[in-house]
Image (cartoon, rainbow, N blue to C red):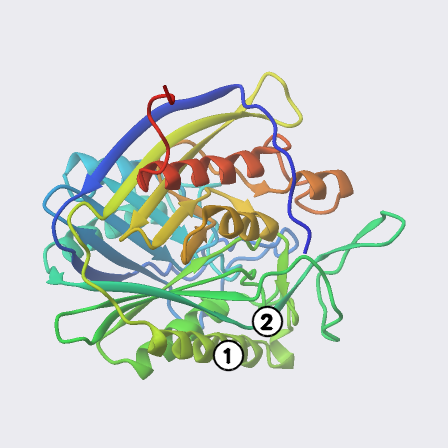
Amino acid sequence: MKKARGCVSVVMFCLLLQVTVIAGGLRAGTARVEITPPVGYVMGGYANRKSPSTGVHDPLYATVLVLKSDEMTVAMVSCDLRSFPSERVVNEARRRKLADHVLISVTHTHSGPMTWEDKTWPSRDSSWYAETEDKILRAIEEASGRLFQARIGSGFGEIYLGHNRRLVSQDGKTTMLWRNAERRATAPIDPAVGVIRVDDETGSPRVVLVNYACHAVVLGPDNRMISADYPGYLARKIESEFPGALCLFMQGGAGDINPYLDKQPVDQNGFGEAEKLGHALAAEATKVLKRIKPQAIEEGSISAIAENIEFRDRWDAHKTVRTGLTTLLINRRIGIATMPGEPFVELQIALRDKAELSGVFLFGYTYSNGGEWAGYIPTIKAAAEGGYGADYNTRIEVGAGEAIVDRAVVNIFKLMNVLKTTPNQ
């Protein structure tokens, strides 16, 4: 695979920078709340699906993992939604001293509700969006109120479940390969399955966090039943194998990655194919989980940098795209970087190659530190080649993805204390 090259300058860099460090042992807490919208809610994900939902095939949830020490708290939230940027949740959690850093990640199911595009349904006084924010805040509070002494570890496996939907020919022409039932070879793709395991003092897994890059679009626009798509099947399978554990799915750099059976019609076993994909991913994640040996953290071994970076709007020089980013380092072994939008897969590969850690995770589709939803975040190479999310239906300036990756790597090195703070004499 070719690595993305180069980056561009940003208009305003580091509007906000805060650094915090966890000291002492690790405590963890979990909670889950249902966030399924009412039947009749407008669905999001497909422009050609004009009708609202007609029922619920499987409920949607927000699952929370809180990691806490005496000095700092991090809340990771995995939502069965297409997107959910909420500055209110981030700020209110800080104001209530529930968490210093909140990562609101989404599985990116396209069989869920419209989210930030309309926050007023069914009414401004009583909206599903505001109610969901309240539920997530209560879940963070609940997780914070039932903490246990924890150990943590990570590992990686490999599985091929999707393809790169931008097909670039030898003459440089780009066409969209939305569906790839024949499983023809495409590039770049990333088969890495990242797993973070959190155990209690008895050695029992209490949290299984799975990180993989693939759009949750097995179900297509013909489906009008609310569903979490394959990530829902993944979570249910993991939890059936490990009673007492909760599974969080954190979407990776899936901006240009589709499942082979994209938009499988419901009347042609659409839900069955989503189940197959979810169970296949669960099987590989389970193999990884069994190899991980969680460890207690040492004093000062969890740290975080949160910042806000302003990029130019690609198409309008008078506009900007303000992106909130968070970088975490756990036990000097696990590095996590967030992007509030849909990063292309090559950015995930670049982060892992550059960070020089045994466990590096890109949480795409993750809102964390204010700002806005950045939409598709292509590589420079992809922006030049074109295609969906590369030269249309994207608005962040070219090179922003590489700049974010480089910034995350710098932050990881800072948190590892390997960067000098004064020049050599």
Pick the residue in front: 9 or 237: 9
Number of the label disc, if any, that sits on residue 161: 2
Horizontal arrangement in the rendering, residue 39 relative to residue 382 (left or right): left
Name which residue type carries label 2.
Leu
- Circle 2: is it few (<14), some (14-19), or many (20+) Cα within 10 Å? many
Number of the label disc, if any, that sits on residue 170: none
Could you tell me residue 163's position as x and y percent?
Answer: 66, 64
Element under disc 2 = loop
Name which residue type carries label 1.
Ala
Pick the residue in front: 233 or 411: 411
Q: Quadrant of the C terminus?
A: top left
Q: Are marks 1 and 2 in contact (CB under 8 Å)?
A: yes
Q: CA distance from mark 1 to mark 2?
A: 8 Å
Q: Does residue 4 appear anywhere in the picture?
A: yes
Q: Which picture quadrant has residue 307?
A: top left
Q: Residue at x 40, y 74 (%)?
A: 288
- Circle 1: is it few (<14), some (14-19), or many (20+) Cα within 10 Å? some
Could you tell me residue 189's position as x and y percent?
Answer: 63, 60
Q: Residue at x 26, y 43 (%)?
A: 303
Number of the label disc, if any, that sits on residue 280: 1
Horizontal arrangement in the rendering, residue 281 relative to residue 326 (left or right): right
In this rendering, the answer to whether 365 lies above or below 111 is: above
Element under disc 1 = helix
Could you tell me residue 24's position as x and y percent?
Answer: 12, 49
Could you tell me residue 416's position as x and y percent?
Answer: 32, 42
Farthest residue toward the front?
Answer: 425
Q: Residue at x 59, y 53 (%)?
A: 345
Of the residues under marks 1 and 2, which one precedes in the sequence? 2
In this rendering, the answer to whether 184 lies above or below 67 is: below
Farthest residue toward the right?
Answer: 171
Q: Residue at x 29, y 40 (%)?
A: 304
